[in-house]
Amino acid sequence: QKEVEQNSGPLSVPEGAIASLNCTYSDRGSQSFFWYRQYSGKSPELIMSIYSNGDKEDGRFTAQLNKASQYVSLLIRDSQPSDSATYLCAVNINSQKVTFGTGTKLQVIP
Amino acid sequence: KAGVTQTPRYLIKTRGQQVTLSCSPISGHRSVSWYQQTPGQGLQFLFEYFSETQRNKGNFPGRFSGRQFSNSRSEMNVSTLELGDSALYLCASSSGQSNEKLFFGSGTQLSVL
């Protein structure tokens, strides 16, 4: 079982819709969870972090964490073509090792 | 603040050679992590250095090694290159405290022929 799993996509949504990206992780002791965005040919950049159960909102982005289900998700409201990228879920397995999923490619169709 | 600087940006090597990649973290950051990114495997953790000590290591063969200097700059070395080592190598810096986010450099694209 992979430590962090994501559906590779592509996930296609029309402009203005809500994009929902999902991630599961295997280590119940994981404490920190991150979403990174990576444009083609660029390096990953952090867009959200979440540490406790529930929702965390930042602009059009909402991260959701359910530790009991070992599940973390990212919602992007009012999706824009500029949101088209690969979204990487990352989990801090211990204090020094951050493990990434393989990423979900999001395509926002104008 | 200057970002994370990785050099060189591109490298072409042949099988059997060795290569050294360099990473300068954000000023004040003491932790440097290295990742290998390939289309099929995604981002794979190589190792993490903090204050010149390797704190964590991924599941890569011993041909992959690294070190960190007193100014927090880090180098990664790959010996006896194989075709499968062709990848984007990314380094990321952070303060080294738990739960801290990672800041990535632009990466070094290594091609092994």
Image (cartoon, coloured by chain):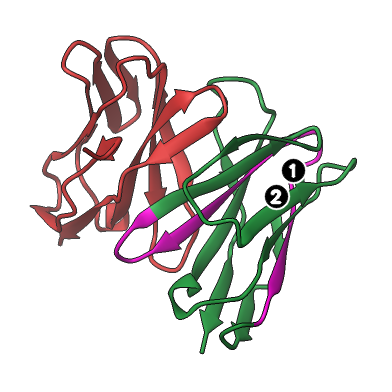
Chain colours: A red, B green
Figure quadrant of residue A64:
top left
Q: CA distance from mark 1 to mark 2?
A: 5 Å
Residue A8 drawn at (x, y percent): 19, 53
The one nearer the camera, B82 or A37, is: B82
In the rendered image, residue A74 lying in the magenta stretch gets the answer: no
User: What residue span does the magenta drawing correspond to?
Assistant: B17-42
Both on one chain, marks 1 and 2? yes
The one nearer the camera, B29 or A30, is: A30
Residue A29 drawn at (x, y percent): 37, 14
Marks 1,2: beta carbons within 8 A:
yes
Q: Assign a secondary structure to mark 1.
A: loop
What residue appears at the point 47 percent right and 47 percent down from the top-left corner?
B59
Chain bearing mark 1: B
Q: Is residue B2 visible?
A: no
Q: Is residue A94 left or right of residue A3?
A: right
Residue tagged by mark 2? Answer: B3
**Amino acid type, mark 1:** Ile
Tell which circle, 1 or 2, labels the residue nearer the N-terminal end.
Answer: 2
* Image mark for residue A97: none
Residue tagged by mark 1? Answer: B26
What residue appears at the point 77 percent right and 43 percent down from the top-left corner?
B1
Figure quadrant of residue B22:
bottom right
In the rendered image, residue B37 lying in the magenta stretch gets the answer: yes
